[in-house]
Amino acid sequence: MSRTVVRGGLVITAAEEMHADVLIEGGRIVAVASSGTQEWTADRVIDASGKYVIPGGVDVHTHIEMPFGGTISSDTFESATRAAAWGGTTSIIDFAIQSVGQSLREGLDLWHAKADAQCAIDYGFHMILSDVNASTLREMDGLVSEGVTSFKLFTAYPGVFYSDDGQILRAMQRAADNGGLIMMHAENGIAIDVLVRQALERGETAPRYHGEVRRALLEAEATHRTIQLARVAGAPLYVVHVAAQEAVAELTAARDLGLPVFGETCPQYLYLSTDNLAEPDFEGAKYVCSTPLRPRDHQTALWRALRTDDLQVVSTDHCPFCFAGQKELGRDDFSKIPNGLPGVENRMDLLHQAVVDGHLTRRRWIEIACATPARMFGLYGKKGTIAPGADADVVVYDPTAEQVISAATHHMNVDYSAYEGKRVTGRVETVLSRGELVIDQRKFTGRAGHGQYMPRATCQYLH
């Protein structure tokens, strides 16, 4: 059994920072000790002097090989997980989709088939419920028992993913019984569709109108409504990709009442804005995602909520579509632009930049990117920390290296970067996944099929 020592780095977890050596054996962390206090022998010694040693990132919101708007997101499980590793992320949770008329099992089996033996890092699945009925409600119990413990519903996209309030309530009641966590895409899709039609009738077809019709108040309204439904059902609620300050206020109010309500945001809402959607020559299409980018003044509320723990997680909602041939489907009609943007490779670096900029502490960086997402979705102890017994998902991170984010150098299978030309300080140097080198001194040494499927426990904030 091979032994690895990561020596001399500043080990940062959500709980503490210490100059320490990390001993790895059999794919697990077996010991952490103050630097220089232990004379461990090992087959491999990784010198982390002057570097951070952090847990691998846990990205709990990706959409890989996802059919949407007449096309399919451009990353494969192989390319997306390789890119994730390059960015210091060692676990992802993707969304398996139940299509209307289908069983949950059929949807889950399809996603297993896509991912099996393709992933460079460990992966799990949430289940999207598109068709809530007596049969699929029964199926939820079985999925929880086999480690698919979270279910996503939509108040958006009528005719595709939309569930009405009665369906949402019934799914929440089921989750209250079986321990599952309901994830909510909270936007009032019925009202948005009216505004979309009215905008197109006025000849407003450019990408910027995507942001204008998907009003912040309609995000806040759906957030408020689903919080109240969760209260009626006695169920916890996790609201995905929170973008609007008015929606943050709804989450904050619920949490002030002590309710088990959680929220996630994404780097695009922290760094990009409606200014990007308004870029000329259809360039704004690159930034079409839902919830949409908001005016820049919403960012203050998001950063504050991340500091006060009113938002707990930063995920990517990685859902890439190439500009050429995919985003262009909506050149004459913003409502036909596939919704989503690439980001799985950039999250850890963008959040480290937030540390550099003074928005977050180093421990909070690890908390929102590694520890809390792992706890939220039943992986903590194995993932999200550096401690004896945890999987050896370890990143050696150079906090002083500078880089420029660009499509020319990223590893995601998409022809543009949402952060093209952005300078950031901090870069991944070496990545271990369960003790195996995946990135070695900025060289990819991983392989498709190393990544294992992760059955998950229920939300660790609820027991």
Image: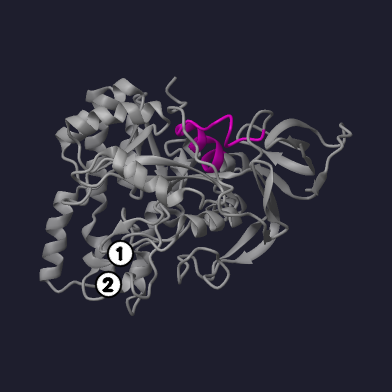
Q: Report the residue at 45% width, 34% height from top.
A: 377
> Pointers 1 and 2 in contact (CB under 8 A)?
yes
Q: Residues within 10 Å of mark 2 (few under 14, many from 20)?
A: some
Is any part of residue 184 visible from this angle? no
Q: Nearer the viewer, mark 1 or mark 2?
A: 1
> Where does label 2 land, which residue?
329
| SS at mark 1 in the image | strand
**Residue 40 in the figure: left or right of residue 311:** right
* Residue 446 marker: none
Q: Quadrant of the N terminus?
A: top right
Is any part of residue 438 visible from this angle? yes
* Residue 71 marker: 1
180 or 401, nearer to the observer? 180
Where residue 214 sits: x, y (%)?
24, 56
| SS at mark 2 in the image | helix
Where residue 28 sits: x, y (%)?
68, 34
Q: Could you tell me how many numbered marks the image carries?
A: 2
- Answer whether residue 379 is magenta in the image: yes
Q: Report the residue at 22% width, 65% height from top.
A: 335
Q: What are the residue bounds of the magenta stretch?
A: 367-386
- Answer whether residue 309 is magenta in the image: no
198 or 184, nearer to the observer? 184
**Residue 166 in the figure: left or right of residue 338:** left
Q: Residues within 10 Å of mark 1 (few under 14, many from 20)?
A: some
Going by the numbered disc 2, the residue's amino acid type is Leu
Q: Quadrant of residue 122?
A: top right
Q: Quadrant of residue 428?
A: bottom right
- Residue that extends furthest to the right in the rendered view of this protein: 39
Going by the numbered disc 1, the residue's amino acid type is Thr
